[in-house]
Structure formats: structure tokens, C-alpha cells
Image (cartoon, rainbow, N blue to C red):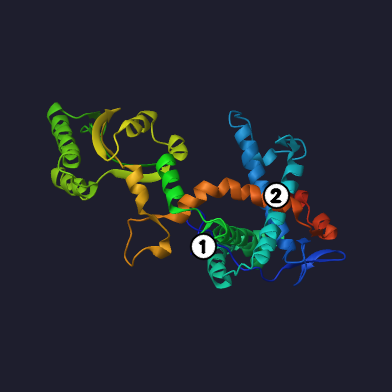
């Protein structure tokens, strides 16, 4: 299976819902939007209006997070505004954009002679169907009431992502039109990523009544001495964090280690849920060295990698030896580098796309209809 970040998966475009002259009905070969390459089913249009409706609710809820009287069920989408648009119009535009975005990547895939692995898409689509569409009788009945078939559901939730990823690889991936050199990827990684590891040990314990209290001085001193030993194992004895973990289990008679590690963009690290003091300690830690610090009654052993050295482990997954697991997937790093550029390219191509609209279908399955069904009206 593929996913964005690593890879994104999707399902093959198959049977679609229909728009007859009198409105939308079920049937093959019918559409809501189309180009000379592909078409979007009526059911997919409906599903996109439902997804955009949910996104609108979230945006309005966020805007009213400090309003104790706010009730999402009472939102008037013809009065509320999102991004300077009346909410119901925002939903329509966003749903349409989802449809045109899919048509755009479908067109680009054909233009670039991209071969889509339909079987892999179907495998992912079947998983989504199982967990979302057919999750319960109520779920299935809801989608059927909306007018979303299993095929339209799969088309909507999986296909765009899969083709998006395949196009990205075609352009920036291995042997792609604009493949990024190893040297450029390594430099970007060293300059923009952070790799950290820490063990957190609480200096609090519980009394006989289950209340949190300070550890006695002897227990604190023992824990601190152990953590200083782990620091010396790294800095003086050139041991690895795996060696530290084994020693921790012995010292604290523990089956597991309360550790955490991550390799991530520094911008994501800055926005992470770690405390500001812990972020500061991690940033100030010397590369390929360990340190020990106490933050809010918690003892920390911290290690950060030398990013220039770590960047040398970047390679494509298909280039890794059998059983090799400590490499860094080049696709992930390239995606971070070129995602914004790629998105701009897709927006430009979307603006150029020539497509047709089935006005009878769109007017029959309105945003207002979707909102009423979503609210159970």
C-alpha cells in the first residue's frame, strides 16, 4: 500500500451514478463533470459536497470555539461566512474544486503516459469501503440516502491521492523529469530536519492514597546518577541509544523504556506538542552528543543526531538492500522539498483545464440537499 508522505493510495475509477434528463438516477456512464479523458460520477459530486460540508462545519466551529452557546446543528449556512464567502457557496466551490482537481490529475496522467496500478488502488479502496462505507448498517444507509454508491465513494476518497503521488514521482522521483540530486537532497535534509531521541523519567511517585508526591532524595539521586551514566555511555564510550535502553532496563528493572524519537522538519518540530522547554533543550543539545536535564519534575536524557552524517543514509526504498531498515526514504525528503512547487503546478494546470458540467445533475443534487441529509432533516 502507498501513502502520501511515504505514498498515497487510491481506487480505480469504475461504475458511476447517473443524471437522467429529469434529474440524477443510478446508472453507468453518467457524470457530473468531465473532460475528454475522464469523468466524475454524480455520486462523487454528492460525496464531495458532503466532505466540503464537514470541512465547513469544522471551520465555523473553530471560529466559534470561545462561544459557549454555539451549536453546530443550528448553523445557518446561508448566513455564516467562510473566507469571505457565504458558507453554502464556499461548500459548493470547494466540492467543485475537488472534482476538477481529480479531472486535472487524470488529464496529466494521460499526457505523461502514466501507467496506473489499478489493482493496488482497488486494494486500498476496498479497505476504505470496509471501514467507512460499510462500517455499519447506519453508515451504509446514510451514504445510500445521500446517493453515494460504493464505486463513487471509492472514486472520491482514494483515486486523487494515488494519481497525485504517481505524478509527483513521475516528475521528481527516481529517473523523473526533474529528479533531485542526492547532494541537493542531503543538503536540504541537513538544513531543514531535526532528529532527536529522549528518555523521560518522572521524579514524582504516588503515596498510599494514590496522590502524586515528590520522590525522596535518595531515589532522585539514584535516577540522576543513572541518567548521567547514560550520557557518558554516549559521549565518552561511543555507545548507541540501543545500548542505553538495555542499561536502563537493568537499572530500573523495567520491561520497556519511556523513550521517544523522531526525524522531522524543523518547522513541524516547532509546532509539535512537546513543551517549549523540552523543544529548547533538544535544539540546544550538541549534535551526536547526549545531555541530561530536569524539566517540571521530569528527568530527561536527550540525544540528537548529526544531520549531515544522518543525511548520508538517504536513499530510495527500492535501492535499499534486503533487510536494510536504517535508511531514510528519499521520497519523503523530496516530497517535503517540492510539495509546494508541485501544488502550484497543479493549480496552474487546473486553471487551464477544459471540462464540461452536467448542469441538470448539479442542480438536482444541491449543497442544500446534502446539508439537510447530513443534519437528518
Q: Is residue 286 visible?
A: yes
The picture quadrant where one finds residue 83 is top right
Q: Is residue 202 visible?
A: no
Q: Which residue is mark 2?
A: 348
Characterize the local packing of mark 2: few (<14), some (14-19) or many (20 or more) Cα atoms within 10 angstroms. few
Query: Which residue occupies the foreground of this view, 9 or 331?
Result: 331
The picture quadrant where one finds residue 107 is bottom right
Up the image or down, 87 lies above or below 353; here it is above
Residue 234 pos. (x, y %): 20, 41
Query: Which residue occupies the foreground of this view, 210 or 140?
Result: 140
Up the image or down, 114 lies above or below 74; here it is below
The picture quadrant where one finds residue 44 is bottom right
Q: Which residue is mark 1?
A: 175
Left or right: 70 as drawn, with respect to 331: right
Up the image or down, 65 lies above or below 27; here it is above
Residue 307 pos. (x, y %): 35, 43
Label 1 element class: loop
Amino acid at each position: 500500500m502507498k501513502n502520501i508522505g511515504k505514498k498515497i493510495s487510491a481506487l480505480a475509477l469504475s461504475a458511476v451514478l447517473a443524471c437522467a434528463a429529469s434529474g440524477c438516477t443510478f446508472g453507468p456512464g453518467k457524470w457530473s463533470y468531465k473532460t475528454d479523458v475522464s469523468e466524475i460520477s454524480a455520486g462523487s459530486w454528492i460525496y464531495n459536497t458532503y466532505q466540503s460540508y464537514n470541512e465547513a462545519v469544522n471551520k465555523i466551529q473553530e471560529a466559534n470555539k470561545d462561544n459557549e452557546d454555539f451549536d453546530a446543528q443550528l448553523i445557518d449556512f446561508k448566513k455564516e461566512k467562510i473566507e469571505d464567502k457565504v458558507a453554502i457557496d464556499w461548500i459548493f466551490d470547494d466540492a467543485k474544486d475537488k472534482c476538477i482537481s481529480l479531472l486535472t490529475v487524470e488529464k496529466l496522467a494521460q499526457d505523461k503516459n502514466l501507467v496506473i496500478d489499478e489493482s493496488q488502488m482497488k486494494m486500498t479502496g476496498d479497505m476504505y469501503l470496509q471501514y467507512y462505507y460499510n462500517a455499519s448498517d447506519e453508515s451504509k444507509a446514510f451514504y445510500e440516502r445521500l446517493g453515494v454508491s460504493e464505486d463513487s465513494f471509492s472514486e472520491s476518497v482514494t483515486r486523487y491521492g494515488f494519481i497525485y503521488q504517481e505524478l509527483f514521482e513521475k516528475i521528481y522521483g527516481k529517473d523523473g523529469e526533474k529528479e533531485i540530486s542526492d547532494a541537493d537532497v542531503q543538503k536540504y535534509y541537513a538544513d531543514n530536519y531535526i532528529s532527536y531521541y529522549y528518555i523521560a523519567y518522572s521524579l514524582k511517585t504516588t503515596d498510599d492514597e494514590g496522590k502524586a508526591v515528590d520522590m525522596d532524595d535518595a531515589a532522585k539521586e539514584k535516577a540522576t546518577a543513572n541518567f548521567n551514566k547514560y550520557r557518558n555511555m554516549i559521549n565518552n564510550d561511543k555507545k548507541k541509544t540501543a545500548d542505553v535502553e538495555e542499561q536502563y532496563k537493568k537499572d530500573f528493572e523495567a520491561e520497556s523504556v519511556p523513550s521517544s524519537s523522531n526525524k522531522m522538519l524543523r518547522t513541524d518540530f516547532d509546532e509539535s506538542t512537546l513543551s517549549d522547554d523540552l523543544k529548547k533543550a533538544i535544539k540546544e543539545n550538541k549534535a551526536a552528543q547526549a545531555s541530561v536535564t530536569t524539566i517540571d519534575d521530569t528527568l530527561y536524557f536527550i540525544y540528537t543526531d548529526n544531520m549531515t552524517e544522518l543525511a548520508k543514509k538517504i536513499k530510495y526504498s527500492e535501492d535499499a538492500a534486503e533487510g536494510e531498515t536504517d535508511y531514510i526514504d528519499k521520497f519523503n525528503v523530496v516530497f517535503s522539498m517540492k510539495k509546494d512547487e508541485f501544488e502550484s503546478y497543479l493549480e496552474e494546470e487546473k486553471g487551464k483545464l477544459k471540462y464540461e458540467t452536467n448542469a441538470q445533475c448539479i442542480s438536482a443534487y444541491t449543497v442544500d440537499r446534502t446539508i439537510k441529509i447530513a443534519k437528518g432533516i
